[in-house]
Image: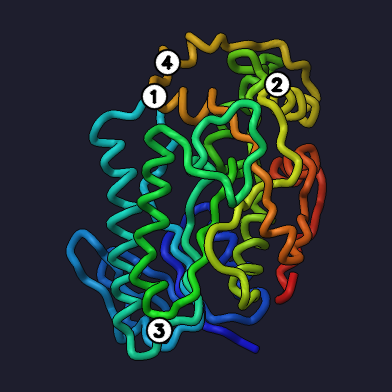
Amino acid sequence: MTIRVAISGATGLVGSALSFALRARGDEITRLVRRVAARSGSEARLDHVSGRVDRDVLEGHDAVVHLAGEPIASWRWTRDKKERIRTSRVDGTRFLADALAGLEHPPAVLVCASAVGFYGSRPGESLDETSEPGDGFLSGVAVEWEAACGPAAEAGIRVVNTRFGVIVDRNDKLITRQLPLARIGLGGRVGNGRQHISWVATDDVVGAILHAIDTPDLTGPINVCSPNTVTNREFARTLSRVVGRPALGWMPGPIAKLVFGEMGRELILTDQDVRPARLLESGYKFIHPELESALRAALGRSTVAATTSKGG
């Protein structure tokens, strides 16, 4: 059965891949954009800054996927950058949730992006959806971000908060910044290299979102990350192996903190061993459960067909 799905952030890394997968299985897409929307009906305006939303276009959609937000990865977080990160997620999500709650024919489900940053840095802990939030800027943003979906949930819309891990994709900044060094043999660990990275392939980000849309009893937070976390050292070695080079580099922790500041502490040196418990319990089958497979697919070193049919 064809469904209608509205997507914010539809031109981003995840949004583009999701739009392709939805169209491939025969669904209809409406892009939520901040500018004045096209008259074709394939776009609807959603701009929390100006307070403008095309409610008439949003009416009657079966699902909404909210992916828009200020990019987190940068060299350093300034005060203004941190405020854009927070307001784009918290205020933008609350504005959308309010708009959906006020529709005469609201969607059955709102799938809203979140992040494993919710848990903060937790060395020595195995984390799942029952774990409490951690400390730090990103954890605080994630808590507010998920809470901003409240008006939609109160209106009877099923809300799923997808807590994404580090996305393994050739266009993601994690890869684009490490790949040049890896290709000349200077890829390597940061700090002591023992910190866990909860990662996920783009195919599985898309697969998990489709699964969330199609699974009526799935609600609340779900961790969207591989069941097989790796350490920072293992990630660097695997990337170097995929490109056929040794991993001879090393960035000491103090240097990472000096160069990247707070962003370095919360993104590069953080330790998060996160498990996708609810995804697995609900029957989702990972396309790339192993990092090497994900990296080879991301870098075009193997051909892996992603499953995009309904029901996964």
Badge 4: how crowded within 10 Å, few (<14), some, or many (20+)?
Answer: few
How many numbered marks are there?
4
Query: Quadrant location of the C terminus?
Result: bottom right
Residue 188 placed where, x, y %?
67, 17
Q: Which residue carries the number 2 mark?
A: 233
Mark positioned earlier in the residue sequence (1 or 3): 3
Q: Disc 2 to disc 1, how far (Cα)?
A: 21 Å
Query: Quadrant location of the N terminus?
Result: bottom right
Q: Disc 3 to disc 2, how far (Cα)?
A: 46 Å
Residue 300 placed where, x, y %?
74, 44
Task: Answer with left or right where residue 230 lies relative to residue 264.
Answer: right
Q: Nearer the viewer, residue 27 or 36?
A: 27
Q: Disc 1 to disc 3, how far (Cα)?
A: 40 Å
Q: Which residue carries the number 3 mark?
A: 106
* Element marked by disc 3: loop
Q: Which residue carries the number 1 mark?
A: 262
Task: Answer with left or right where residue 86 lies relative to residue 63.
Answer: left
Mark 4 belongs to which amino acid?
Val
Mark positioned earlier in the residue sequence (2 or 1): 2
Q: Which residue carries the number 4 mark?
A: 259
Q: Nearer the viewer, residue 300 or 145?
A: 145
Mark positioned earlier in the residue sequence (3 or 4): 3
* Element marked by disc 1: helix
- The vertical placement of 31 against 140, above or below, is below
Residue 128 placed where, x, y %?
63, 47
Task: Answer with left or right where residue 254 lies relative to residue 144.
Answer: right
Residue at image point 26% right, 64% down: 47
Residue 180 placed where, x, y %?
61, 24
Q: Foreground mark, 3 or 4?
A: 3
- Quadrant of the rendered structure where residue 58 is? bottom left
Mark 1 belongs to which amino acid?
Glu
